[in-house]
Image (cartoon, grey):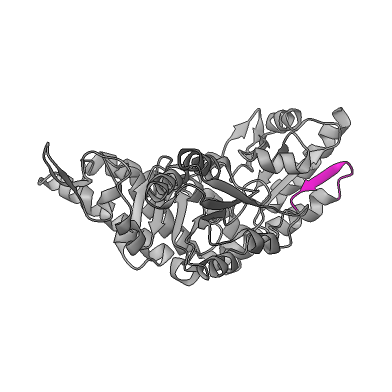
Amino acid sequence: MMFTNKQFTNKIRADFPILNQEIYCKPLIYLDNGATTQKPKQVIDAVSKFYSETNSNIHRGVHFLSEKSTLHYENARETVRQFVNANSTKEIIFTKGTTDAINLIANTFGEKYIKEGDEILISEMEHHSNIVPWQMVCERKNATLKIIPFNDKGELIFEEFEKLLSKKTKIVAVTHISNSLGTINPIKKIIEKAHKLNVPVLIDAAQSIQHFKTDVQELDCDFLVFSGHKIYAETGIGILYGKEKLLEALPPYQGGGDMIKTVDFEKTTYADLPLKYEAGTSNYVGAISLGVAIDYLQDIGFDDIIKYEKELLDYATKKLSSIKGLRLIGTAKNKASVISFILENIHNYDAGTLLDKMGIAVRTGTHCCQPVMKHFGIAGTIRASFAFYNTFEEIDKLHDAIIRIQKLF
């Protein structure tokens, strides 16, 4: 079955109730998938069914509902394990999201391994969530944050990464796909190079996990993080994958219920992985929604998703590039389905506001990537980010709307 078949595309769109509405008397065109994806009815129905029939706090109850709820939660963990091909469910930690997962590693790894004079290596295109936690570690430990630069196409300069990598480097943390530029970074190559110096690597997969299959064993990454709401699940849930031996060696991040074996006023002993890092009542409903969302994507098939989103990107790039006065920001050869651009003499916020009045939802501003904007000497961009439920007709309407805005100005 060809994914570009209109009938099939309509079938996919029918799974997303939110898309079937009008905004300001215009059909909704949702092109803000980099910020959050919409939820299929399979996820919505599963969450509603769980609250209606099963809801109870996990792990600590011996009654029927608690045991059933716990089973759903741990089944979701196994679904994630299989999805990223981790060795064990001990390596799958449920978090609040990507930011929470990065902070977990920054704090625990930083506490145990970072010392004065050490270096942490990130890239110039990182989201603030993969900058600020490492800055805080460096300030606390009197360490140094080193930055891998990118060129004006938005591609990491690998030779500069090689120069920055040294015996002082204690960890590399880099995004798989830039949320502001769409660049797909050569993370396999980065990991291989870092491992030659025994430097662990954390991959921010918040923008990549929904676009193509990720195999943590094939990549050999040490840590990988992502958010559920970027991959068609609920908000407030995310994943930290970490190699078991590394997670075992790190200290706990937070204290409280579920992460303990025994508590005494003299000494507390901690639970085994993965509960060691899941203090308090977890977002177990969010975890269940993540498992359902992953099953949904796998039923569609990532080969079809990759093919179709690549066609959308190519079509949108050609279409928008034809507009006089429009400048693309981020023209890497290897890109995901994200297009950032600016319009000559029109502020990104003004353009975004007018697009909204035409029923088109895009993201405007710095996209939590102020250093990227500084690199290009701009205040921000307009970002259209596509998912497999978007259509070529929607791209045509975006093109026409931009031309109309230019005429208005």
Q: Is residue 361 above or below residue 91?
A: above
Q: Residue at x 85, y 34 (%)?
A: 406
Residue 57 lies, in percent from the top left, at 21, 41
Q: How many labels does the image show?
A: 0
Q: Nearer the viewer, residue 73 or 41?
A: 73
* Res. 362 visible in picture: no
- Quarter where residue 76 is shown: bottom left
Q: In this view, does 285 lie above or below 209?
A: above
Q: Is residue 175 above or below residue 243?
A: above
Residue 165 lies, in percent from the top left, at 59, 61
Q: In which quarter of the image is the N terminus?
A: bottom right
Q: Which residue is drawn at 57% across and 57% down?
A: 176
Q: Nearer the viewer, residue 37 or 104?
A: 104
- Quarter where residue 265 is shown: top left
- Quarter where residue 160 is shown: bottom right
Is residue 407 covered in magenta?
Answer: no
Q: Nearer the viewer, residue 179 or 195?
A: 195
Bounds of the magenta span?
322-330
Is residue 329 covered in magenta?
Answer: yes
Residue at the extreme front: 117
Residue 328 lies, in percent from the top left, at 79, 47
Residue 94 lies, in percent from the top left, at 35, 49
Q: Which residue is drawn at 36% across and 44% down?
A: 286
* Res. 178 visible in picture: yes
Q: In which quarter of the image is the C terminus?
A: top right
